[in-house]
Amino acid sequence: MSPAMPRHTPLYSQHLASGAKLVNFAGWAMPIHYGSQVEEHHQVRRDAGLFDVSHMVVLDVLGADAQAFLRRLLANDVARLRDPGKALYSCMLDASGGVIDDLIVYFVRDGEYRLVVNAATRDKDLAWIRRQAAGEAVTIRERDDLAMLAVQGPQARDKTFAALGEGLAPAMDLPPFHAVECGPLFVARTGYTGEDGFEIILPAAQAPALWDALLAAGVAPAGLGARDTLRLEAGMNLYGQDMDESTSPLVSGLAWTVAFEPAERDFIGRAALQAERERGPAQRLVGLLLEGRGVLRAHQRVFTDAGEGEITSGGFSPTLGRAIALARVPAAAGEQGEVEIRGKRLPVRRVEYPFVRHGRACIA
Amino acid sequence: MTPIPSELPLELKYTKTHEWVRDEGDGSVTVGITDHAQALLGDMVYIELPDPGDALEAGEECAVVESVKAASDVYAPVTGVVIDVNGDLEEAPETVNRDPYGDGWLFHMKLEDPAELDGLLDAEAYAEMIAEEE
């Protein structure tokens, strides 16, 4: 349960000044939109939008055993991170292969990694990580002193350089999915929208000035509502909706994030996933497109030739102008199906996702 | 697009479920959802309307407005028969956000009993109700 009074991020005053509608999200007062979610969505696809994601949890993993520890903790393999600054997306699994959380891990330097995990799973994640770290030469440091901003969109990088000038020089040639320290700023070319851009982690006290500078450079604020429709169009999973502890990565469209090689790496959940892989996963996560008018929503039932499934995330895609969804369906399901909306069955078609990437529709 | 804040039109009647009703003076009414309702729901993306000829009972679910956030039922404010619906909303559901009391109307219905209008809220009572909700 969230405390009665939601916490404020360091950008709370900025949100009020920009006319945010605030909602309680995972115990934080967060902007859901600043007037129009759809306009903010288009702003990110066409230009540049600014998100406060300071509610997300930054954890530094430090110490001589940091790499060995994370190679056991995470289903993806941090040994793949050879260059300092390189990032990796991974699930953190329990012994039965259920997803405790999904996260991004940055290799900062030898003996130092940075994890960004979900706000809603903070306490559970910390308890799990600390339990696994007991007896290892690692320190887990919660970085509540930091804020996090995401600048996303085709113009995001240019406008961020315009706002920060020389201070951002080390990030000039930063490749996708890499991070670099620019003085006190930890600048990563990552995001959750399917657009180019940066995620910037910085001391909380400096966040308001950066926010204001980015707005002055023509980046418009965007809320969690647009963040959700953008990530859905980009085909990115949302923890708690598209996967959780009752589902494995293999039935959640996340098999690509599990590093089964090298075979001798014994990560938590490995035995369960290997057994599931050998039997063949019973379900899979697919993209759906509603053929007619209407809106797909999470938990609607999906009927296929191989049995029933369920929508895990659904909504109206502002870029495509039609309803899209991610759904967990029987592995053998064919391309055509039906979704039940208010007692009526409407035709849907399975499509490869992402639905939208870099401002362009990816589906016919 | 930021919806233009509107004063509650004084000439309209309202329901506890946030519909507005305009008495057309010929035994028919026009029905929509209030500015307060559209602001709570957010950007409209799909609107399902009744069919002309449908006979509605007061309080019956008769339309659905779907925003980016959620689907929300619209209830018939009075008993009667649907005589016309706002077909423009099929292509432009956002009209309900932009002009909830004007071009964003939902349907037009013939009243069974014009006296039923007296049982609805006036602007003042509706304003009080939403103030209490907040």
Image (tube, helix red, strand yellow):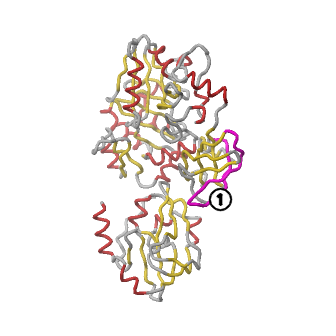
* Residue at image location 47% in from the left, 68% down from the top: B74
**Residue furthest bottom as drawn:** B26
A18 and A345: which is toward the camera: A345
Q: Quick one: B62 or A144, which is closer to the camera?
A: B62
> Which of A238/A265 is in front?
A265
Residue A57 visible to the viewer:
yes
* A271 on left or right of B121: right
Q: Report the span colored magenta.
A: A331-353
Confirm whether residue A157 shows in the render.
no
Q: Determine the chain carrying the residue at label 1.
A: A
Task: Decide whether residue A348 is among the magenta residues.
Answer: yes
Q: Amino acid at mark 1?
A: Gly
Q: Characterize the local packing of mark 1: few (<14), some (14-19) or many (20 or more) Cα atoms within 10 angstroms.
A: few
- Where disc 1 sits, the SS reads loop
Pinpoint residue B84: horizontal percent, then vertical percent. Answer: 56, 78
Image location of residue B5, percent across then percent down: 37, 65
Q: Is residue B12 magenta?
A: no
Q: Quadrant of residue A64?
A: top left
Determine which residue is flagged by label 1.
Answer: A292
Q: For the N terminus of chain A, which image quadrant?
A: top left
Counting labels gives 1
Predominant secondary structure, magenta span: strand
Viewer-proximal residue among A41 and A127: A127
Residue A63 percent coordinates (x, y):
40, 13
Identity of the residue drawn at 56% across and 64% down: B92
Q: Quadrant of residue A81?
A: top right
Q: Position of residue B117 (x, y in %)?
A: 39, 82
Up-down: is B109 above or below B64? below
